[in-house]
């Protein structure tokens, strides 16, 4: 497989991971009958964003790099809030 084809496949994988987070969020909300954002939404956001960031770096696209690198930080920060809140609740 040539390098460009491999990177396009990596980019498509990242996009599939990133898109799947909305399916997960929708199914979780349907199950709860209210809008919720489960932690797996943020995990898929990090995975998809990280793969897309690597693709953007390979493409040398500064707009795409900036968008994905900022997003990955925000997704990780949301997970930090979720898990640090759970830890505090368990210690109380």
Image: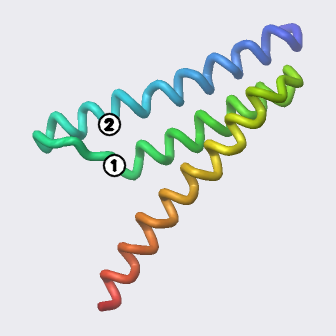
Whichever of labels 2 and 1 marks the residue nearer the N terminus, that label is 2
Residue at which label 2 appears: 25
Outermost residue toward the left? 33
Q: Please state if 4 lies on the left or on the right of 89 as rendered.
A: right
Q: Are marks 2 and 1 in contact (CB under 8 Å)?
A: yes
Q: Position of residue 39 (x, y in %)?
A: 39, 52
Residue 18 in the image, given as x and y percentages of width and height: 53, 29
Comparing 59 with 9, the one in front is 59
Q: Is disc 2 placed on a helix, strand or loop?
A: helix
**Residue indicated by mark 1:** 38
In the displayed structure, would residue 4 be above or below residue 46?
Answer: above
Establish if 79 lies above or below 19: below
**The quarter of the displayed image where residue 25 is located:** top left
Q: Residues within 10 Å of mark 2 (few under 14, many from 20)?
A: some
Q: Position of residue 42 (x, y in %)?
A: 47, 47
Q: Secondary structure at mark 1?
A: loop
Q: Quadrant of the N terminus?
A: top right
State the separation of the CA atoms marked 2 and 1: 7 Å
**Which residue is at 15% across, 39% downward?**
31
Whole-percent x, y for residue 52 in the image: 68, 29
Taking depth in this image into account, of 67 and 50 the one nearest to the observer is 67
């Amino acid at each position: 497989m040539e390098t460009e084809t491999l990177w396009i496949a990596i980019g498509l994988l990242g996009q599939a991971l990133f898109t799947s987070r909305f399916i997960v969020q929708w199914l979780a909300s349907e199950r709860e009958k209210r809008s919720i954002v489960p932690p797996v939404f943020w995990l898929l956001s990090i995975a998809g964003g990280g793969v897309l960031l690597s693709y953007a770096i390979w493409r040398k696209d500064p707009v795409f790099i900036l968008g994905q690198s900022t997003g990955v930080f925000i997704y990780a920060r949301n997970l930090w809030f979720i898990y640090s809140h759970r830890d505090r609740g368990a210690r109380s």
